[in-house]
Image (tube, rainbow, N blue to C red):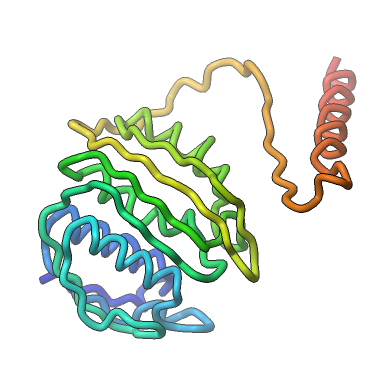
Amino acid sequence: MIEVDGSQKSGSGTILRLSIAFASILGLPLRIYNIRQNRPQPGLRPQHLEAVFTAAKLCEAQVEGARLNSRELVFKPKEIKGGKIEAEIGTAGSLPMLIMTVLPICVFAKTSVQLHVSKGGTDVSNSPTINYMRNVFLPVLKHMGVNAAITVHKYGYYPKGMGEITLMVEPAKRLKPLILKDFGNLKAIKGISVCTFLAERRVADRQAAAASEHSERKDTLQT
């Protein structure tokens, strides 16, 4: 059995997420204790709890001690099968962080994975945004042979959450090391402005205009 002290280093949820992913991929039982010991609210919060349960669905794991605020759990995975999975956080807990937990597991599934997650936060503090995951993180992983995509059905923010996404992952026959030596040439600069509930105030339009003006001004000064 793998035993992990969750209070080591940062003592954060990252230790939990990586431990669950590695245990699932290796097919080894895991006991993790002192979960999120160094955080203001130690133990399992709703987003961590749902990440554990989602991972368990992917590999038919037996889970002991997984409940709200729990600081210790046992996770006993079986074969990673894949298929269609449903998950629901129920708060503004981070959808991207749940993805970070299960994505490595999905890569090693027997079949493709379609994970639908609802009622969570797509853009919340102390977490990557969902568009960072879509447009930066996953394209980089594609160089390693990870074929995955995220569809955003609804954005969600603190305090209600209510975001909704679908993650599609194809099993990887072989993963390659990530080597980024060639920086290449700059072809274009693009941005995404997410301004839910602010369409009438034209926030996205004003942000796009300001970004274009700043870029043109910078090019003129460099010339």
For residue 102, above or below residue 70: above
- For the residue pair 31 and 76, the one nearer the viewer reads as 76
Residue 35 x %, y %: 35, 78
Q: Quadrant of the N terminus?
A: bottom left
Count the numbered circles shown. 0
169 and 38: which is toward the camera: 169
Closer-to-camera residue (96/216): 96
In the figure, is residue 94 to the left or right of 14? right
| Residue 169 in the image, given as x and y percentages of width and height | 32, 39
Q: Is residue 79 above or below residue 175?
A: below
Q: Image quadrant for the C terminus?
A: top right
Q: Residue at x 30, y 67 (%)?
A: 53
Q: Position of residue 2 (x, y in %)?
A: 15, 69
Q: Is residue 142 above or below residue 196?
A: above
- 1 vs 23, left or right, is left
Q: Is residue 7 left or right of residue 105?
A: right
Instruction: Return the x and y of residue 47 as percentages of the image width and height.
Output: 44, 68
Q: Residue at x 15, y 42 (%)?
A: 110
Q: Quadrant of residue 60?
A: bottom left
Residue depicted at 33% across the width and 75% down the height: 6
